[in-house]
């Protein structure tokens, strides 16, 4: 396993719609392992393949925040939201591609998602609470959408300018 480089907004690859995974092979298993390691190292609770520059429909997540509890790593291939609750909830969201910027986003409080797991089995599960927010945030990445796209234009531009500045500083070393 290895830690991959996380792309920082703005980056054209974070704005693209990604392609479905056609087959689960060694490359995909390695990608999933690397994404989990990269997510835990960051640390974060979710990561989507385009954030590491791979334009495929793969996300990983683990929203178990209690350090005492066992890790609950999940790998979702070709995930799809198939039902959303009418009830909404608001969470302060952040993103590993937009470091240290947080904003409240309103989304459906519960979602049902279908996906293919690493063994090729079709799965279907209902998510609530933080898991629901996280899975929607990560699936958005597969469609080139970021949490700041839910904010007003002024707030979004302010965050984007901060990220451009951060990227210039990182480039200088
Ligand atoms: Zn994100």
Image: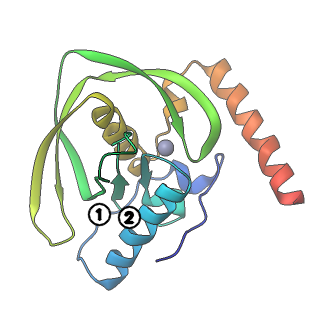
x and y, in percent, of residue 50 in the image? 48, 58
Against 150, residue 31 (above or below) is below
- The residue identified by callout 1 is 20
Is residue 146 visible in the rendered image? The answer is yes
- The residue located at (38%, 78%) in the rendering is 30
Q: Nearer the viewer, residue 66 or 2?
A: 66
x and y, in percent, of residue 160 in the image? 69, 35
**Please, what secondary structure does the residue beneath circle 2 have?**
loop
Q: Quadrant of residue 91?
A: top left
- The residue located at (40%, 45%) in the rendering is 67
Q: Nearer the viewer, residue 19 or 121?
A: 121
Against 172, residue 160 (above or below) is above
The reply, left or right, for residue 94 in relation to residue 85 is: right
- The residue located at (37%, 40%) in the rendering is 66
Mark 1 or mark 2: which comes first in sequence?
1
Q: CA distance from mark 1 to mark 2?
A: 6 Å
x and y, in percent, of residue 75 in the image? 28, 60
Is mark 1 in CB contact (under 8 Å) with mark 2? yes
The reply, left or right, for residue 82 in relation to residue 9 is: left
Q: How is the image coloured?
A: rainbow
The reply, left or right, for residue 114 in relation to residue 91 is: left
Work out which quarter of the rendered image holds the C terminus and state it: bottom right
Number of other residues with Cα within 10 Å of mark 1, as a class: few under 14, some 14 to 19, many 20 or more:
some
Against 5, residue 138 (above or below) is above
- The residue identified by callout 2 is 56
Check residue 65 in the rendering and tell me which mark sits there, or answer none. Answer: none
Report the residue that reaches farthest toward the top.
87
- The residue located at (65%, 21%) in the rendering is 155
Ligand 1 within 8 angstroms of badge 2 C-beta: no
x and y, in percent, of residue 144 in the image? 46, 47
Q: Quadrant of residue 151?
A: top right
Against 149, residue 72 (above or below) is below
């Amino acid at each position: 396993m290895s830690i991959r480089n996380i792309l920082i907004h703005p980056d054209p690859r974070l704005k693209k719609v990604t392609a479905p995974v056609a087959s689960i092979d060694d490359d995909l298993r390695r990608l999933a392992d690397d994404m989990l390691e990269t997510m835990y190292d960051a640390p974060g609770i979710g990561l989507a393949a385009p954030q590491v520059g791979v334009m495929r429909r793969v996300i990983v997540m683990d929203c178990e925040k209690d350090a005492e509890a066992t890790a609950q790593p999940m790998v979702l291939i070709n995930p799809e939201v198939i039902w959303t609750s009418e009830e909404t909830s608001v969470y302060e969201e952040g993103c590993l591609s937009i470091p240290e910027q947080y904003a409240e986003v309103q989304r459906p409080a519960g979602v049902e998602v279908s996906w293919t797991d690493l063994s090729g089995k079709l799965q279907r599960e209902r998510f609530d609470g933080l898991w629901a927010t996280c899975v929607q945030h990560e699936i958005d990445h597969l469609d080139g959408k970021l949490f700041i796209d839910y904010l007003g234009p002024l707030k979004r531009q302010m965050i984007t300018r901060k990220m451009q500045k951060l990227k210039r500083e990182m480039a200088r070393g």
